[in-house]
Amino acid sequence: MGSQLIEEQAWSALEKSIIYFRGQPIGTIAALDPEIAALNYDQCFIRDFISSALLFLIKGRPEIVRNFLEATLTLQPKTGQLDCSKPSRGLMPASFKIQSFNGQEYLKADFGDHAIGRVAPADACLWWVILLRAYTLSTQDTDLVEREDFQEGIRLVLELCLVTRFDMYPMVLVPDAASMIDRRMGLYGHPLDIQSLFFAALKASLEMLVPNETNQFMIRAVENRLIPLTKQIRENYWLDPDRLNVIYRFQVEEYGEEALNQFNIYSDSIPFYRLANWLPEAGGYLAGNLGPSQLDCRFFSLGNLMAIIVSLTDEQQSHKILNLIELRWNDLVGHMPMKLCYPALEDSDWRIVTGADPKNRPWSYHNGGSWPVLLWMLTAAAKKMDRGELAHHAIAVAERRLMEDHWPEYYDGPDGRLIGKEARTCQTWTITGYLLAKELLANPDHLKLITFAEEQ
Ligand code: GLC
């Protein structure tokens, strides 16, 4: 199948996914599968819209992104609530849909109150801040971001992450299933996927908050958080052969501020022999989660790729992550770029950690399934580090299947060969993940919309 034909099809499918609110384009729906009941896939998800939005910015269609940013801002609760059934101030919804009443259209938001398992979308407000920066960079329209309602929107997101909290770590604490992985997968606490977005949202906020009196407090809070957050992730989430050796011989039960094993990680909780076998000498990655006596050694693609893109990892670490992807290609990319996490939880781990969730059985969906949307992040990370060949290779792999399979949401199996058991077809972020990867490869200048310079 020619690449040009695939792209034409993809653009036309993207066009069909656009939704209109009072006559204006405002977002894209999650999937346009004609064969399965829509459930909530006819909604516009904030996280799903990001790749669509970046494409619209690249193609000179910023109005839709602006409409989206304005609409979602109106959905963000602005006042404190004592009612636990109402979303917290500052939160952004996971998704919204358009409803008609008496001939008038309204936006209806889902903050997790309608979602399976009532899961909270902690990533939505972080993506919103990241997208607002991309919009501003792309259009040079500073009027929007400087508007008081937008400044307030940023402040409220930051307040939610920075101000009131239970723990003493620099990472942000979230419940399980609070991101793209929106079912229970053992990600309560400080999952990497959220930390990478959190870091990017902090950096973006610093660029966007006008340094006036109202913002002073938040600007200082962000600056104070960035340094320890970066240090924590680069040091304590990092796993490579050297680090494995250190953790293997960790002392435990250390008390006090000088403790080396700060999190009291017990050696027996880590699959050292499997990891020592799997981790190439030249490779490394950021662990999936870190907390008291917990170091989750699964590889999570979104968190690792976004860490490279936004310079949360240093240059050497970024290369080591890409080395790992290159050297463990069959495990992490296989027949469809790329695994959401690796390896899958199996047997009693699957039963205990996911709550025996059949949709997330081993090597399916979130539990070791392959998600084509990650193609754009892989491409961006590879291009940023001047490793374009990895991106070319991954795109070629994806092109063999995506259009023929009607753009599935995800693939199953240890090698990503099976179309996901319950996957939708015509999934918008599959389509845009592919198109955005192509655009970033063709013109790496667009990377600036999503990357941050590394601080030395
Ligand atoms: C699934 C995914 C979630 C996505 C949604 C819409 O629930 O887990 O990440 O936003 O579908 O595509």
Image (cartoon, rainbow, N blue to C red):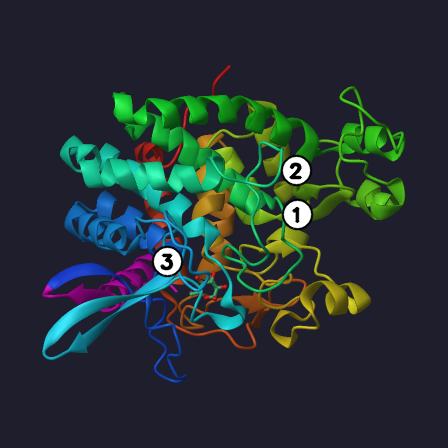
Number of residues whose C-alpha sits closer than 10 Å to that of mark 3, classed few (under 14), some (14–19) or many (20 or more): many
Look at the image and say whether residue 14 sits in the magenta stretch.
yes
Residue at numbered disc 3: 93
Looking at the figure, which quarter contains the N terminus? bottom left
Residue at numbered disc 1: 299
Question: Are the residues flagged by discs 1 and 2 in contact, CB closer than 8 Å?
Answer: yes
Q: Where does the image place residue 97, in percent across and percent down from the top left?
A: 28, 68
Mark 2 vs mark 3: in front: 3
Look at the image and say whether residue 83 sits in the magenta stretch.
no
At mark 2, the secondary structure is: strand
Residue sitting at the far front: 82
| Of 81 and 114, the residue lying toward us | 81
Residue at numbered disc 2: 285
* Amino acid, disc 1: Phe
Q: Where does the image place residue 158, in percent across and percent down from the top left?
A: 40, 37
* Amino acid, disc 3: Pro
